[in-house]
Amino acid sequence: ICAEDELGVGTSHDGIMVLPNDTKIGTTAREYFQIVDDYQYEIGLTPNRIDAASHFGVARDLMAYLGLHNNAKHAVRPSVDGFKVENQSLTIPVEVKATQACPRYSGVTVSGIKVGPSPKWLQDRLKAIGLNPINNVVDVTNYVLHEIGQPLHAFDADVIKGNKVVVRTMPEGTSFVTLDGVERKLHADDLMICNESEPMCIAGVFGGLHSGVTEKTTKIFIESACFNPVSVRKTARRHGLNTDASFRFERGTDVNITIWALKRAAMLIKEVAGGTISSEVIDVYPTPVEKFRVEFNVERAWSLIGKNIPTDTIEKILKGLEIDVTSKNGNDWVLAVPTYRVDVLREADVVEDVLRIYGYNNIEMPQKVSSTLNYSRKPDSYQLQNIAADFLTNNRFNEIMCNSLTKAAYYKNLNTFPEQNSVQILNPLSNDLSVLRQTLLFGGLESIQRNTNFRNPDLKLYEFGNCYKFNADIDNPKTPLDRYTENFRLAIWLTGDKDAEHWSQKSDKVNFFNLKSYVHSLLNRFGFDTNSLEHTETPSDIFDYGMVYKTNGGKVVATFGVVNSNLTKDFDIKADVFFAEIEWDILLKQSTKNKISYTELPKYPEVCRDLALLIDTAVTYEQVRKLAYATERKLLKNVNLFDVYQGKNLPEGKKSYAVSFTLQDETKTLTDEQIDRTMKRLIEAYIRELGAQLR
């Protein structure tokens, strides 16, 4: 007990479908409703292959394969040789004022038509691809769209005021009602198809409510155009529209197929709706687009493919793909690529097409690998990322990948990453994705929040990613892009317990020094001597306590610390979060200077001496360590803080550091006299520079 639309045999939903009394019981639904069997193929297209987003496009690609492997020679494109202008009683001129957004606009008129239901064959074909028939004129435009991939639009010629079509933009805020009955406010950059006084259609996206074909229409103007992909995409996103036409225009349609599509549609409309073609084809095409020129070298193609495919086979494949070989000079060829292949712009694209048609399965596994190793002083960023990732993964970190788009609210009231330095998105999908991130911090906090909510609070995470900044303080940039910077960074997050809970050991919380050790290990791995870096506390408001490492030239290498508790509270994270951000580009530059050198194993023993220093609480261990290395450069190998005490039995404002010093001479055994002399210099330096006392 169903309505027509529920059974899929009609569009009516007025009530239960009742069959006549004389209907023969036992008749199959297929037979009674005259349902035509058909086959559907779902083809997963990559975004760059818009040329195959039609029946003809798929057939054209199959033809190249079958022409090589099965010697198929039949044509696939319907002929339009029967197109004939019968009178010129309805000529509608076209003016294109926005030629950059509309490189080509073609049109033709058909008069004396009768709008009504499409014939069964046309309805069946549209239903087979999931489209509902509307009327014979609209159905033809949809049919041609899916047949050859060219979007079309039919206007009621009687509503084209001034008997003229103008392609232009409208003033900001102009009201326009689209086919779905929604009133929209136009943007100043929205390309519109207008008559002499008002807009009729959003170009390449959606038609207007009052200019479309109705049952009363007797004369039509058919549009076949090519619109700029960027313009269409921005307009569609601004208005939240996604149509079959915008899908194709956004990816790039063939500028040289508009006339053929127009003739095809006009002939079909004559067939299903009657009428006469009442004007010459109007074609505004100020700058014709020629086939793309691509230089192609056969030997390079062989190298990329891994097999020496015969040149006549390559040429046959190119011919099947409608790519012309315009000239040859040995293995150097010049090719002319058809304009519908917007994805083929370079030699590698042609090689990919040749390999695809030839067949990946026809490339045998080589007996040996041929490779050329080139020495370069330029570091391989991807390889070094893998080294860093391996180190972190081996230390039980998990890699995350967060969205570069983030909330503007995260940067409100921050001094380290001011809100005005955020790169704003002109047409954000939502308020949560309105700016580009200035730091990797907040993406990691979102991940920690989600994991904590799922009872996974013990986390060690890292991420590689770009960060972006708008430099509003640059007054007179040479180019608009001068105000924007982009930096690649590595971020690390620690939170929760250091180790998994176990009966044999106590579970300690991660702390600042755990994070610091990972930062040191990474910097050392890439050739930084952390002792030579400038270590200072950072005043950054993203940390409760943090440090920054800088080179001697003042460039920031790494910033790390305990994330500000007010920030973690915003994410409902109760545990401390430790965060580090490393400037990857600085790391890469240093890696070029990191030359491996080898020395003999030490022949002479190390000597350790300890000092217990009473110092002011404001003095940091970093000051103690750096002063030691500045005082004794030759013999001092290591400084280690092994105990800190502050409290009972110590004067107010004081603390005790127990520090061990490792001394070694690589040429001889140290004498007691040398050791005592060195320790004396260290003690004097601590007393003089830090006001220390020996305990």
Image (cartoon, helix red, strand yellow):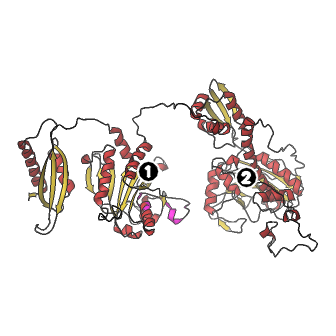
Residue 213 x, y percent position in the rendering: 81, 62
Pick out the residue farthest to the bottom.
15
Q: Which mark is residue 485?
A: 1
Q: Which mark is residue 655?
A: none
Residue 589 x, y percent position in the rendering: 36, 42
User: Which label sits in the foreground, 2 or 1?
Assistant: 2
Pick out the residue farthest to the left.
673
Q: Which mark is residue 41?
A: 2
Query: Could you say whether the residue bearing mark 1 is in a helix, strand or loop?
Result: strand
Q: Which image quarter holds the C terminus?
A: bottom left
Pick out the residue farthest to the right.
22
Residue at x 74% of width, y 65% of height: 209
Q: Was residue 589 drawn as part of the magenta stretch in this picture? A: no
Residue at x 63% of width, y 53% of height: 231
Determine the image quadrant of residue 206.
Answer: bottom right
Kind of residue indicated by mark 1: Thr
Q: Which residues are magenta?
A: 425-443
Q: Is residue 544 above or below residue 294?
A: below
Determine the image quadrant of residue 190.
Answer: bottom right
Kind of residue indicated by mark 2: Tyr
> Which sits earlier in the primary sequence, circle 2 or circle 1?
2
**Does 231 sit left or right of 608 as displayed?**
right
Does any portion of residue 215 appear in the rendered image?
Answer: no
Q: Nearer the viewer, residue 51 or 166?
A: 51
Query: Could you say whether the residue bearing mark 2 is in a helix, strand or loop?
Result: loop
- How packed mark 1 is, by other alpha carbons closer than 10 Å (few <14, some 14-19, many 20 or more), is few
Q: Nearer the viewer, residue 650 or 455?
A: 455
Q: Circles 2 and 1: CB distance less than 8 Å?
A: no
Q: Which image quarter holds the N terminus?
A: bottom right
Q: Is residue 669 above or below residue 176?
A: above
